[in-house]
Amino acid sequence: MKLSIIVPVYNMAGDNKLQFCLESLLSQNLNEYEIIAVDDCSTDESLVVLKEYEKNYPDKMKVIHSEVNKHQGGAKNIGIRAARGEWIGFIDADDWIDPDMYSQMLKKAEETGADMVGCDLNLVHSHTYEVGEVIESNGSRSQCGELDHEKKKSLILDGGRLVVKIYKRETIVDNELFFPENIFYEDNAMSNSYLLTAKHYEHIDKPWYYYYQHNASTVHSFSERMCLDRMESARIMVSEAKRLGFYEEFKPEIEYEFTQLFYVNTLFTYMPCVRPCKLSFVKKLTEEMMHTFPDFGNNSYYVERTGKEEKKLVGMACRNAAGFYFYYKALWAYRNFRKKLKH
């Protein structure tokens, strides 16, 4: 078996999302591959849809039903353990891919000896194969080839999404690259682990992955639980770096990634989006950030890559969490008031 495509599924039957995804996988210009769809205890008709496809395509489809909802990380782990392919690819059940994506990735791997191959993705708002806004996913030529120290640094900082790549199954299994379960942002926790255990990376400059933008998507909804999960994913990212032995070598890059994921992104998601917005949450978040990386403000990547306004507000939060909290709430209220006046 050449390739296993793992599809975690939870409540994707509506709007033809799951069907469109599966049709794109069944249309791959490739022999010797399997589709492992893991139903994560869906409460809609997703499992019924999956079983129908398994019945119609028994040579390609394998459906596994999880009796317990474990989130995408748990569903992916079930898929990894069931996979028979030499290579593994992941796809979200509301997205879809070009018919040539996996065949061309495997061809590139055979031609170059790569053990990880990626492509670009594009953002779309309807079920179409017309290419939308193209997002380059670590397509820089400087990242490709045998992965030395500089290339790995670059991948940590700009690694792109896991779903636009294929990986050797033996690398995943040998390094125990299983995802955290029962949390969101499982990919953020494991991205560096997948990127840095590879030895040779190649990229194809084609937007073959269609990333569906819709209101039910995780990226369009936020809660305190999701903020807590994002924080946990950052902690796991650091513990994984230590477990796999690349923490000390890439500490500045990991510190910056932790700062963005754990603190900056969480802070500026929580304050405007989560209700009720609690001062106690901001205080605990800031205290842990300062305890984990007390000098993060001097990190060269943070200095260069973080916006001036963000750095100003982060500095305020670190000096006085309560002062930041009330200042930000007043600032947000004022900006919303100005928007209303314009309309």
Image (spheres, rainbow, N blue to C red):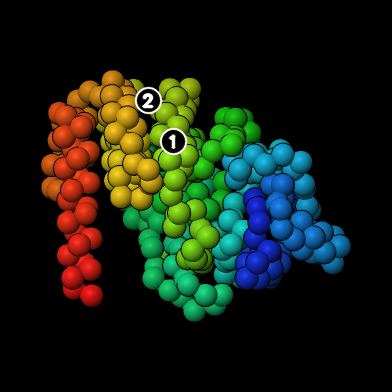
The span from disc 2 to disc 1 (Cα, nearest Å) is 23 Å
Residue 111 position by quadrant:
bottom right
Residue in the picture at 76% in, 56% down: 47
Q: In what element is the residue under mark 1?
A: helix
Say which quadrant the C terminus sits in.
bottom left
Residue in the picture at 37% in, 43% down: 276
> Going from the N terminus, do you reach mark 2 or mark 1 first?
1
Residue in the picture at 28% in, 20% down: 291
Determine whether 224 is above or below 321 in the image: below
Determine whether 286 is above or below 14 in the image: above
Image location of residue 130, percent across then percent down: 49, 79
What residue type is disc 1 on? Answer: Leu
Q: Nearer the viewer, residue 13 or 324?
A: 324
Image location of residue 220, percent across then percent down: 44, 57
What residue type is disc 2 on? Answer: Tyr
Q: Residue 247 carries which label?
A: 2
Q: Residue 101 carries which label?
A: none
Q: Which mark is residue 228?
A: 1
